[in-house]
Image (tube, rainbow, N blue to C red):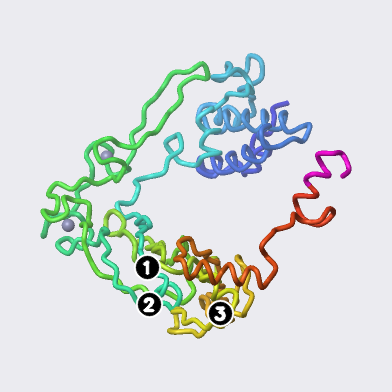
Amino acid sequence: MAKDYYAILGVGREATPDEIKRAYRKLARQYHPDVNSEPDAQDRFKEINAAYEVLSDPQKRQMVDMGADPLAPGGGGPGPGGPGGPFVGFQDIMDAFFGGAAGGASRGPRPRTRPGSDALIRLDLDLEETAFGIEAPLTVDTAAVCETCHGEGTAPGTHPATCDMCGGSGEVQSVQRTFLGQVMTTRPCGNCQGFGTVIPNPCPTCGGDGRVQTRRTVTVKIPAGIEDGMRIRLAGQGEVGPGGGPPGDLYVEIHERSHDVFSRKGEDLHCRVVLPMTAAALGTQMTLKSLDGEENVEVKPGTQPGATIKIKSKGVPRLRGGGRGDLFVHLDVKTPTRLDAEQEKLLKELSKLRGEETIEPARPGGGFFSRMRDAFNGHA
Ligand SMILES: [Zn+2]
Ligand SMILES: [Zn+2]
């Protein structure tokens, strides 16, 4: 008994070739052994292919309609890949997976108008500017829509013409013979670069690109507390795309110039002050220029080298969350190197008064050097 090929594809006897093709593609996608791991998928897939081979061929379909089976031994001769073979209608299988009517991965003409790319520019700022924010004018060199052709790329009064080579599809097909039989491949048309149209009279201003390199000024608002290396995004201020396509974004990368006095760590500022030995011993008042103006800083008597004074909330404003970092003043103590006779005499007197004429090494178990010695002698 002849197989019911119509039932295999799930179509009626009056189905049009288009309906048969659609039904076949749907089933081929569903039962292809690469995507369906059910044990009977392969058999089902062969069956679907056989049914399509028969019903897509008007002659074979006629035989079926007369009650014969064109694939049965002696029924009507084998198909291109043998009866029910896996490569029946190879191109149709390709179509089932990749779509397209003529073959291959057909995509149609690509649009002349494409989105533009992002642009990046660098902005050098001083610490005062990154700390408190600023509105900075930026000179930006990017592509903008061509004013002559408004992005179309054609000379005034002319229009793009359909490409002769591909007939407007943007692609050309070629047939290759492979061990699977003939395979149709598709590639972008070389004459129109895949656009499907050519521009016979390019715009004299932009040469057909639809955009021109332009210099303009953009004002960027720098928020207080921004840090070196951060980027600000200005949406839609980047390059206009080919054919006047929508612009990308403009990124402004912040570079903070190094400051004469302060070094910045996040929201905190650090600076270094060198004190004369006498001031460190006696204590003093000093005036320090912070980002906000003059600060009176008190140095306590007996300040040691390496001591730090913290001035609260005189650092950089926090970018998020409010408040400010602190200012840290690192103190160095300078020992005088050139003493005149009178200074030397005074210091010797001081030394005598303080009983500092002879220096004792640190006591065992005390300082760093005694611990070193113990380590060397194995007492550690
Ligand atoms: Zn073309
Ligand atoms: Zn133009």
- Counting from the top left corner in percent of width and height, residue 145 is at 24, 62
Kind of element beneath mark 1: strand
Cβ of mark 2 under 8 A from ligand 2: no
Amino acid bearing label 1:
Leu
Quarter of the image for the N terminus: give it: top right
Kind of element beneath mark 3: loop
Seen in the image, is 181 located left or right of residue 257? right
For disc 2, the marked residue is 134
> Which quadrant does ligand 2 occupy?
bottom left
Q: Residue at x 18, y 48 (%)?
A: 199
Seen in the image, is 211 located left or right of residue 107? left
Q: Residue furthest top?
A: 74
Seen in the image, is 186 located left or right of residue 1? left
Question: Magenta stretch?
Answer: 372-380
Q: Is residue 374 magenta?
A: yes
> In the rendering, which numbered label is found on residue 125?
1
Are dots 1 and 2 in contact, CB under 8 Å? yes
- Counting from the top left corner in percent of width and height, residue 305 is at 60, 66
> In the rendering, which numbered label is found on residue 324?
3
| Circle nearer the N terminus (1, 2) | 1
Q: Residue at x 77, y 56 (%)?
A: 362
